[in-house]
């Protein structure tokens, strides 16, 4: 199956610093990538949808100036958490979807996630 | 009302048991339905898609009732390795292709 990687897998940073998380589709071209966040014992919550070459669409309540998303190529999207605070500590997961083909079921492939801890 | 609702459990069952999970969704425009499995501190992995006619994959059977907006997952002959959180997921194509996740139902299978 399709493989999506994320880097780093975990990161600890100090409050006020910025952290960049990379999401790569390794064996397919991802027209669309999604960024989710999951707090302990909570469901995955969509933060934003990014399409290659265009601005990301953010979900209500997600600050676009705090969570900067760049999808500059068909295999790479980055999420930068700017001026991180302890409440941003969470599990960040990206997913990627191939260029749509007729009859496909919109399956998404998830990266392994990045665990961010802000101290 | 949450868009996708699941009984959080946990469901504690012995090996060999049959266990069923239920899920309801609120948006009648939902088009695609899935069950994902998530192990502790890992990303979700697709377990199976759910089709209107119902579908089976080995010990796993998924059913969909569009009229009731209800999805189920049945696991037969539970194995220790089935212990995980099972996520009910829907896709509303009119809203793009983002997936909407339920909170998950935790299953613990013991020997």
Image: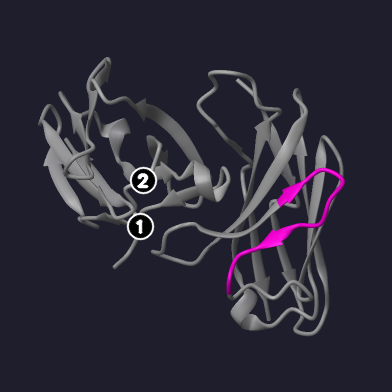
* Quadrant in which the C terminus of chain B appears: top left
**Which portion, as a residue range, is magenta?**
A50-60
Which colouring convention does the figure follow? Answer: one colour
The numbered mark 2 sits on a residue in which chain? B
Kindly identify which residue carries mark 2: B87
User: In the rendered image, which quarter is residue A56 located in?
Assistant: bottom right
* Residues tagged 1 and 2 counted as in contact (Cβ below 8 A): yes
Locate residue B80, reporting x and y percent: 26, 33
Kindly identify which residue carries mark 1: B103
Relative side of A57 to B37, left or right: right
Nearer to the camera, B78 or A70: A70
Q: Residues within 10 Å of mark 1 (few under 14, many from 20)?
A: many
- Asked whether residue A91 is in view, the answer is yes
Relative side of B97 to A11, left or right: left
Q: Is residue A103 magenta?
A: no
- The tag earlier along the polypeptide, 1 or 2, is 2
- Asked whether residue B42 is in view, the answer is no
The numbered mark 1 sits on a residue in which chain? B
Q: Which mark is residue A22?
A: none
Locate residue B6, reporting x and y percent: 25, 54
Q: Residues within 10 Å of mark 2 (few under 14, many from 20)?
A: many
Q: Secondary structure at mark 1?
A: loop
Asked if marks 1 and 2 fall on the same chain, the answer is: yes
């Amino acid at each position: 199956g399709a493989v999506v990687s994320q880097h780093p897998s975990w990161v600890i940073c100090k409050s006020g610093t910025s952290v960049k998380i990379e999401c790569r589709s390794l064996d397919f071209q991802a027209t669309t990538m999604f960024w989710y966040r999951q707090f302990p014992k909570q469901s995955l919550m969509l933060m934003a949808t990014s399409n290659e070459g265009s601005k990301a669409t953010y979900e209500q309540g997600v600050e676009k100036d705090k969570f900067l998303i760049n999808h500059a190529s068909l295999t790479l999207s980055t999420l930068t958490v700017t001026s991180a605070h302890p409440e941003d500590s969470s599990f960040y997961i990206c997913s990627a979807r191939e260029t749509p083909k007729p009859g496909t079921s919109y399956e998404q492939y998830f990266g392994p996630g990045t665990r961010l801890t802000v101290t | 009302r949450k868009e996708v609702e699941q009984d959080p459990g946990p469901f504690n069952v012995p090996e060999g048991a049959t266990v069923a999970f239920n899920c309801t969704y609120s948006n009648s425009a939902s088009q695609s339905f899935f069950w994902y499995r998530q192990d502790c501190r890992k990303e979700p992995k697709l377990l199976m898609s759910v089709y209107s006619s119902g579908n089976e994959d080995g010990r796993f059977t998924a059913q969909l009732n569009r009229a009731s907006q209800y999805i189920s997952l049945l696991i037969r002959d539970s194995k220790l390795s089935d212990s995980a959180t099972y996520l009910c997921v829907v896709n509303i194509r009119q809203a793009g292709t983002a997936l909407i996740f339920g909170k998950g139902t935790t299953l613990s299978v013991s020997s």
